[in-house]
Image (cartoon, rainbow, N blue to C red):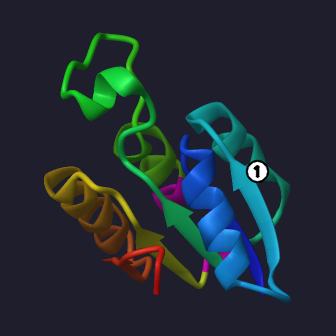
Amino acid sequence: MKVLFLDDNEDRWRDFRARRIGWDLTYVRNHDEALTALDSQRWDEIWLDHDLSEMATLGIYGQQEKTGCQCVAEAIAALPKSLQPGAVFVHSLNPPGAKRIVATLQRAGIPAKQRSWLK
């Protein structure tokens, strides 16, 4: 299973990877890396975090702030059918942000839900 995992916290990545032995995992730390990965292939699953910087985590958004919801989820929603993932899971500690990501993806017909990366 090809899985893309977006999170700026390497500890979360290590925990996620340790629970998915045998999966083909790719870790990206920010929206630019995620957007590049989306262009490269179709993913069976994509795991997204919403708050990708300390400022976003604190709820301080500047004009240049790019979160999973604003950039990556919209890019996933715009993918051609042949590149759309089988499922997207949002593992954010920001429940309102996670709901926005899920809603963006579901409106585009992509299976998405909020889920802990620990499961």
Secondary structure at numbered mark 1: helix
Q: Position of residue 21 (x, y in %)?
A: 79, 86
Tell me the quadrant of the picture where the N terminus can be found.
bottom right
Vertical position of residue 33 compared to residue 112: above or below: above
Residue 2 in which image quadrant: bottom right
Identify the residue shown where x is 75% and y is 42%: 36
Please indicate whether residue 51 sits to the left or right of residue 39 in the image.
left
Q: How many marks?
A: 1
Vertical position of residue 77 compared to residue 29: above or below: below
Residue 38 in view: no
Q: Position of residue 53 (x, y in %)?
A: 43, 28
Magenta segment, which residues? 76-85
Identify the residue shown where x is 30% and y is 67%: 102
Looking at the image, the residue that sits furthest to the top is 63
Identify the residue shown where x is 71% and y is 76%: 18
Q: Position of residue 45 (x, y in %)?
A: 62, 78
Q: Position of residue 99 (x, y in %)?
A: 20, 63
Looking at the image, the residue that sits furthest to the left is 96
For badge 1, the amino acid type reads: Ala
Identify the residue shown where x is 50% and y is 46%: 72
Vertical position of residue 43 compared to residue 11: above or below: below
Vertical position of residue 112 compared to residue 51: above or below: below
Task: For label 1, count other residues whose C-alpha is less than 10 Å away and answer few (under 14), some (14-19) or many (20+).
Answer: some
Q: Which residue is mark 1?
A: 37
Please indicate whether residue 66 sits to the left or right of residue 63 in the image.
right
Inspect the magenta stretch and tell me whether residue 84 lies in it. yes
Residue 67 in which image quadrant: top left
Inspect the magenta stretch and tell me whether residue 54 lies in it. no
Q: Nearer the viewer, residue 60 or 108?
A: 60
Residue 112 in which image quadrant: bottom left
